[in-house]
Amino acid sequence: MHIEKGEFVGIIGHNGSGKSTLSKLLNAIIFPTQGDVMVSGLNTKDHENLWTIRQTAGMVFQNPDNQLVATIVEEDVAFGPENLGVPPQEIRERVDRALAVVEMQAYAHQKPHQLSGGQKQRIAIAGILAMEPECIIFDEPTAMLDPSGRREVMETIRRLNRDKDMTVIHITHFMEEIVAADRIIVLDKGKVVMEGEPRMIFRQVKRLKEIGLDVPQMTELAYELRSEGLKIDDDVLSIEEMVNALCQ
């Protein structure tokens, strides 16, 4: 599989399909036993490339508490660049820029443990942004958040891709989060079994269910209505599209 610069790629698959393993391979946390993983032309098997690869492909995990290391928000965001040996003045600039991108400037002097789950995850994203990666891998970043926290984080992810032209690899169980992706890759037993635009993937409701996956709620509703004889397109993804389909 290939992921192009500036793409927003959603990766889905049931538990045990290999999603988290893939994310760790892309970030050189683990290494392939066969084949190769290339990040920006660098092979993850070459240990001399490790720090460049991890700087190129940042990673945001499920639980933001596992990524927050300091007692003050701005110190936490500065942690990555400090470890990369970035000069203090530039660290200051990077921290301010990263907090602005995730819209958390007002919380720079707060204690991370006082923030909501969505705010913590946005600080974790800022910490990765401060290292100036070309690509960010999100490994189920909204799994532990409530709906409002999920919305906050997804708005941040979309903005990074749209406004900053950042490559986004988004691994998720929430199908609604990737309806606007450029491409979706479906994994099953460690292999790519489906690949294409969201409409093309999600209209295959029966096949997705066979491998243990859901589809967006509106696609599911369209599928049920079609099975009851209503003439509705099989690629409905959003509430707005469903309203239009029903009104017609």
Image: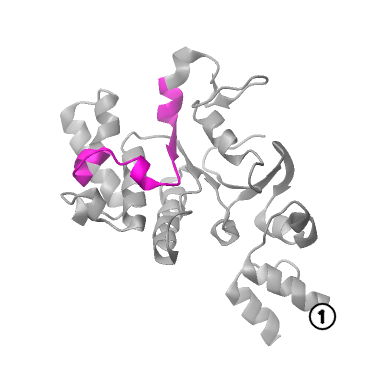
Residue 104 left/right relative to 30: left
> Toward which corner of the image does residue 193 lie, by quadrant?
top right
Q: Residue 138: x, y in percent? A: 48, 44
Verify whether residue 62 appears in magenta: yes
Task: Please identify the residue farthest to the bottom as the structure is shown.
Answer: 247
Q: Is residue 43 left or right of residue 105?
A: right
Horizontal arrangement in the rendering, residue 212 relative to residue 169 (left or right): right
Residue behind mark 1: 228
Residue 128 placement: quadrant: top left
Q: Residue visible at 72% across and 66% down?
A: 235
Helix, strand or loop status at disc 1: loop
- In this rendering, does residue 94 appear at all? no
Give the magenta part as a residue range: 51-77
Residue 224: give x, y in percent of width and height: 76, 74
Q: Between residues 187 and 105, which one lies in front from this camera angle?
A: 187
Residue at the image point whose x is 20% and y is 39% from the top? 75
| Residue 40 colored in magenta in the image | no
Residue type, mark 1 in image: Glu
Mark 1 crowd level (few <14, some 14–19, many ≥20, 10 Å Cα)? few
Question: Vertical placement of 27 versus 74: above or below?
Answer: above
Q: Which x, y percent locates residue 142? A: 46, 54
Q: Quadrant of the N terminus?
A: top right
